[in-house]
Amino acid sequence: MNNCYIKVCTIILFLSLSFLVSGQEETSRKVAFGKGISYLAKDTSFAVKFNLRMQQLFILAYDEASDQTMSQFLVRRFRLKFGGFVFTPDLEYKVELGLSNRDISVDKEDGNTRDAARIIFDAVLKWKFAKNWALWVGQTKLPGNRERVISSGSLQFVDRSLLNSAYNIDRDAGLQLRGKFDLGNTIIAPSFSISQGEGRNITSTNAGGYDYTAHVDFLPLGEFSNKGDFISADLEREQSPKLAIGLTYDYNDGAVRQGGQLGNFVQDSLGNYVENSLSTFFIDLMFKYQGFSLLSEYANKSAAHQIEDISKGFLTGTGFTAQVGYLFNNNLEIALRYTNLRREDDLSAISDEDQYTLGVSKYIVDHNLKVQGDITRSTFPDISDGAYQFRMQVEMQF
């Protein structure tokens, strides 16, 4: 049934797209590669922009302990994105749908999504009620660590770091308040959110408490070009140094999933949900100047209680990642990344691990058309054997 539903949704979306690009004298349209397809009603009562992107990925991995090699081709991501405004430019919306198997991934959700495909990533309204202030309502990314907020289509490596996989607070449904103001020469952008706390596309009632997030960005050297503080690699080749520092604190009251918004639902031996409040702290830094870029993050996730009689442990511990890259004049970039994870205690579901990654990217049309490859060496503090992984990915988005 899920496959039929996906096919129907896809057909409807592409029929809608055909309508948007058909000859309509009463509308204005703009089409440009990488900028999507834009449609504006003649009376300017609404606007819509459509984007499509896909990632074709090859993975080759070798594990020293088992002496086994694994390879795989897959569609890593396939996304449809809609955005624009309705009634007034101060009321914006964003919709993002994921149709690849990795995007949908229903296996960890048990009955909380009614076994339906998790197609919806973003479905959010943004009301600009005052200058530089907006209220967001719906499901979208929480204001968390920078690496997670950066789109998966704008990454410097094939994918995000191990720190992000373990600790990020991802997407959730609720309310967000976002603002920005100047304090002397420093730009400050605070964000606050209250959300359900169990991640995207949850259909059951709230099992625990709510999730509360507070985030603030500091830009002491002024704004980045073209929102470059949320784009990996210095494609704009900043002519003066740019720096962004982000602080995030998230409290998930009575979390029932391993990571709060992500991971398996934690149960006791009788099959009952186990609640455990999770606190997450992030600090991140991004620096760019004349083709050089640096992104670094630290994460700490802790649980209020140690619980032994459970099916899965909570994802608690610390992590650090740092990556540097340099973009040459031919739009070829070389990047290096180091990441480590350390578990909070013996009950944590985190495994201690260090990763060293070398990446190469060729930006044909910025992040809209690019080829990326990276190789990673993974080591484990308590195990002599490690692992290698090679990835090659082609990305296209219009």
Image (cartoon, rainbow, N blue to C red):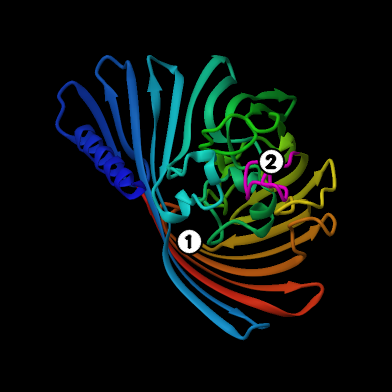
Is residue 208 positioned above or below 354 on the image?
above
Q: Nearer the viewer, mark 2 or mark 1?
A: 2
Residue appearing at x 68%, y 70% in the figure: 356
Residue appearing at x 66%, y 26% in the figure: 194
Examine the image and state in which quarter residue 131 appears. Answer: top right
Of label 2 and label 1, which has the lower sequence position? 2
| Numbered disc 2: secondary structure | loop
Disc 2 to disc 1, C-alpha distance: 45 Å
Examine the image and state in which quarter residue 227 appears. Answer: top right
Is residue 203 positioned above or below 85 on the image?
below
Q: Is any part of residue 304 visible from this angle? A: yes
| Numbered disc 1: secondary structure | loop
Q: Is any part of residue 220 visible from this angle? A: no
Question: Which mark is drawn over residue 256?
Answer: 2
Residue appearing at x 60%, y 61% in the figure: 326
Q: Which residue is mark 1?
A: 331
User: Residue 169, percent across and down?
Assistant: 65, 42
Residue appearing at x 56%, y 57% in the figure: 156
The magenta-colored residue range is 259-275
Give the amino acid type for the residue marked by disc 1 in the picture. Asn
Secondary structure, magenta segment, majority class = loop
Left-right relation of 359 to 345: left
Contact (CB < 8 A) between labels 2 and 1?
no
Left-right relation of 343 to 369: right
Q: Please name whichever residue, 283 or 104, is drawn nearer the observer in this view of the structure.
A: 104
User: Residue 19, percent across and down?
Assistant: 20, 33
Q: Please name whichever residue, 373 or 77, is drawn nearer the observer in this view of the structure.
A: 77
Left-right relation of 260 to 306: left
Q: Please name whichever residue, 214 or 40, is drawn nearer the observer in this view of the structure.
A: 214
Left-right relation of 91 to 6: right
User: Residue 242, percent across and down?
Assistant: 67, 44
Is residue 63 positioned above or below 271 on the image?
below
